[in-house]
Amino acid sequence: MKKLGFGLMRLPQTNPDDYSSVDIEAVKLLADEFLAKGFTYFDTAAPYHGGNSEVAFREAVVKRYPRSAYTITDKLSLFMLKKPEEMPGFFEAQLERLGLDYVDYYWLHGLGGPSYRQAEEFGAFEFVQKLHAEGKAKHIGLSFHDKAELLDEILTKHPEMEYVQLQLNYLDWEDATVQSRLCYEVATKHHKPVIVMEPIKGGSLVNIPQEAQDLFKTFHPDLSVASWAIRFAASPKNVMMVLSGMNTPEQMADNTSYMQNFRPLDDEERAVIDKAASVIRNAIAIPCTACRYCTDGCPKKIAIPDYFAIYNNLKRFGAEQNMVAMTYYGNLNKTHGKASDCIHCGKCEARCPQHLPIRQYLEDVAKALEG
């Protein structure tokens, strides 16, 4: 199986102001090109385009190609449900929108601290196992947005999960909040193949500083900026698939060109990416090194470095990262004080080796992430 998957979260729209208005004819052209190049893996979920991502897949692929020509991943989005009794109906409605009687892969969607607890309370792990036993979900797994320690806990308790979908890209690889590398290592330790989401951070790693673009173009004038991010994500040995939300013919042609006969990054290319990543990181709003000296003794147990990392990503990439930023911030709020809980005692600033105005920065974080 080729390593590029078609993510159906950001499809072309007939109305730019209406997320549910999927342009079915445009999706057909993209799917045709994708399949013609020998790629087969598609990924969707009920929240994508208000359910119309699944409908678009039915119209563009299911009705026009034999079942053996493609594989489809869908997800159990527990945040859309209020009680466990709704899970069977939710899944059956997905099958109806897809026009299928089974899915190839079915994930517990976007697990983090709060959603993992909901999954346990709802019996969601047992539910997807039942679907697997009935042949309605050929493979089961989870997509994940939280710390590596929690992922390790989940996979230790639930070895029946076959796959893990992770946010992985060259900026988040060592990020204190996303922990791409650490999460990848946990999945590998548990022998779970990894499917990568957000390899270019929702398109953000295309819109990078000119200095970083020049580094890439000087080394490989013929390759796109996006190709560096996709190839970085696909290079780790335990990565099975990299999703890309291609919504134009140009994006489809570009991604399939270098992924058709995929070549992992070599050491020289990795060095170029390290330099480019450094350039991008230097354009950060808060120069925090995540030493965590500030958190010791905080009376409100505020996750200061983690909040700064989320804020920096939001400021660096703008509205495209708003949903991801809110998700990670919300997860941390369950076990830590919010930025707005700061009582301005100043203990953090007294311990900061960088002498940062932490209290002011926390006010900025609160304005951006709490409204």
Image: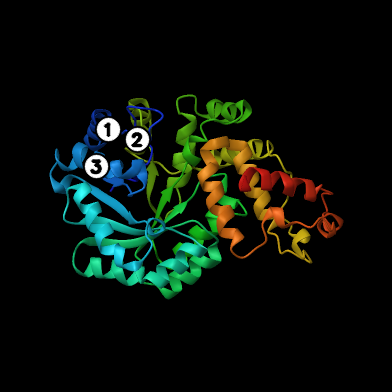
| Secondary structure category for the residue under label 1 | helix
Whether residue 225 sits left or right of residue 109 in the image: it is: right
Looking at the rendered structure, the kind of residue marked 3 is Val
Whether residue 7 sits left or right of residue 40 in the image: it is: right
Q: Position of residue 42 (x, y in %)?
A: 29, 45
Q: Which residue is mark 2?
A: 11
Q: Report if residue 178 is visible in the image.
A: no
Pair 3/2: label in front:
3
Looking at the rendered structure, the kind of residue marked 2 is Leu
User: Pointer 3: residues within 10 angstroms few (<14), some, or many (20+)?
Assistant: many
Measured Cα–Cα span from mark 3 to mark 1: 11 Å
Measured Cα–Cα span from mark 1 to mark 2: 7 Å
Query: Going 24% across and 42% down the picture, which residue do you hit?
Result: 55
Tell me which numbered mark, 1 or 2, is placed earlier along the sequence: 2
Measured Cα–Cα span from mark 3 to mark 2: 12 Å
Q: Quadrant of residue 129?
A: bottom left
Judging depth in this view, the residue of 307 and 264 nearest the camera is 307
Which numbered tag is attached to residue 55?
Answer: 3
Query: Going 29% across and 30% down the picture, which residue do you hit?
Result: 23
Judging depth in this view, the residue of 267 and 206 nearest the camera is 206
Tell me which numbered mark, 3 or 2, is placed earlier along the sequence: 2
Judging depth in this view, the residue of 7 and 116 nearest the camera is 116
User: Pointer 1: residues within 10 angstroms few (<14), some, or many (20+)?
Assistant: many
Query: Going 42% across and 54% down the picture, which residue do you hit?
Result: 237
Q: Taking 242 as reference, is 117 above or below it?
A: below
Furthest toward the bottom, the residue is 157
